[in-house]
Amino acid sequence: MKKLFLLLAMSSICIFSSAQNAFGIKAGVNLASMSFDVDDDFGSDWNKDIHPLLTASILGKIELSYTANLTLELGLVQRGSKVSYDEDGQEAAISETMNQIQFSPGIAFNASDEFSIGFAPYIGYATQQQSKVSFDPDPFDESDTDTSDLDDEQKLDYGLNINLNYLIDDAFLISAGYSLGLKDYNAEFNDEYDADLDPLTNSGIMISIGYLFGN
């Protein structure tokens, strides 16, 4: 899988160079979540919270026509979830975070010279997951953080990104969108143990800024 992403990166760079269109960098925040029922999994006193995480990528834009562009994006997207508890003076929070390498080829349609809307499937790959548990007041005097390897069937993720883009002076990019994961992380467990767990998928609201060269 690592060789596949290296090949995708090299191919993207070659395409950007040969097409002589715009390429750039982008960074921002992923307001991440996952599709579990917090009442069923943790209890009615727990809340599902937005988990603010980081994204950073290189991107390219190849003009197909006056109204449409091919887009290519390769970078790091942090994904995960967070739940919290706040009752009777006791606060607690549990979060999980994965550093996912993501490749996303898509197409963007121009509504004007400044505005566009993009649709892009994505494929992501992560090898580890970090879990953190914290309490306030903390009976253990410190938060507990654990990093564990993901099983092979849990490493791959895929889905669809939808973005609204605003371009300033043909260079500065502001992007906001939604990432809808289609990979069910419970599917393998359900098949192996004949269980009936609800689908567990990634999602996130993506907000980022970037800069395009050669546009």
Image (tube, rainbow, N blue to C red):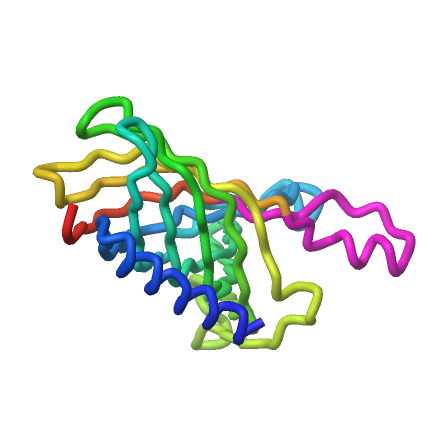
**Residue 4 versus residue 26 in the image, above or below:** below
Please indicate whether residue 185 sits to the left or right of residue 113 in the image: right
Q: Residue at x 49, y 74 (%)?
A: 145
Please indicate whether residue 192 sits to the left or right of residue 121 in the image: right
Q: Residue 33: x, y in percent?
A: 51, 47
Q: Does the stretch in magenta take in 160?
A: no
Question: Which range of residues does the magenta coloring cover?
Answer: 183-203
Q: Residue 44: x, y in percent?
A: 64, 40
Q: Residue 85: x, y in percent?
A: 52, 50
Please indicate whether residue 61 sits to the left or right of residue 184 in the image: left
Q: Residue 165: x, y in percent?
A: 27, 35
Q: Visible in this render: residue 51?
A: yes
Q: Visible in this render: residue 92?
A: no
Of the pair 82 and 135, the residue shown nearer to us: 82
Q: Does the stretch in magenta take in 194?
A: yes
Q: Residue at x 46, y 69 (%)?
A: 138
Q: Residue at x 8, y 38 (%)?
A: 169
